[in-house]
Amino acid sequence: MIEYKEITIKSDKKYFYTNGLVSFINKEIRLSIGKYGEDEYVSVIKYIIDYIVTESPSISEDQTIAYYSWVLQFKSENESYYDLYEVEFDGEGFHKGCDLSISIIKSQSELCFQYGVVPQFPSFSQSIVISKGVYEGKDIEAIRYESPQDMCGWWLITDDYDNNIQSLMTVHYYHVAFKRPDILKYLAVPFGYRFLMENGEVKITKDEEGE
């Protein structure tokens, strides 16, 4: 049993669940246990508690919430709890639990730690600039510029780019996340960095030109 911001987090063999959020959202939160350890699931629950206690939102059935660079959903399968679901890898619906979310955030965080930088997670509400060839799975040259809040800052270019800036497309980040899961772990690298994907290998460097 864990106490966090006056909310109790408990667990059994199937779920982690809260005690104390009912006064905020009329129900408690329940999270299905998968393949990860206690710390990972507790971190998710704490993230949700922070959101609810700080923002005092009105939660309803099927409402979504950003979890760093992925998305969770509140599902009311029980009169006492909202179960946490997560969006599928390809964006086609939601499934119970959050193992995919944990996996993505862990891979992004670990990569940033490897390079000694603090992750800057893009969100599904933000936009991203891409050229032709990104959705088709081609090798990418990417650079992340400091940008307004509605933009994640990434510009993704392939060999299909014709050097005509008018041909670039501004799309929602989630379209790229669903179409290119192979680059997800690189997309939390902060402003001022770039990566080059070439022949199955990826090289990350600081953008010297932007300094």
Image: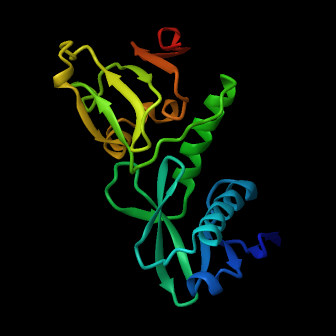
Q: Is residue 14 above or below residue 169?
A: below
Closest to the observer: 44 or 23? Answer: 23
* Total numbered badges shown on the rendered structure: 0
Q: Residue furthest top?
A: 209
Left or right: where does residue 184 sit relative to residue 56? Answer: left
Q: Is residue 32 left or right of residue 168?
A: right
Which residue: 44% across, 79% down?
60
Q: Quadrant of residue 116?
A: top right
Using the image as rendered, state which of residue 117 and residue 178 is in the foreground.
117
Residue 113, position in %: x, y? 68, 30
Position in image of residue 83 (x %, y %): 53, 74
Q: Residue furthest bottom?
A: 79
Q: Residue at x 44, y 31 (%)?
A: 183
**173 above or below 72?**
above
Viewer-proximal residue, 109 or 26?
26
Q: Above or below — where is 17 with respect to 105?
A: below
Q: Nearer the viewer, residue 69 or 91?
A: 69
Q: How is the image coloured?
A: rainbow
Judge from the rendering whether residue 188 lies leftward or rightward of residue 154; answer left or right. right
Question: Residue 189 at x, y = what percent?
Answer: 55, 29
Residue at 48% over, 77% down: 59
Residue 4's image quarter? bottom right
Q: Quadrant of the N terminus?
A: bottom right
- In the rendered image, residue 186, in percent from the top left (x then y), is placed at 50, 29
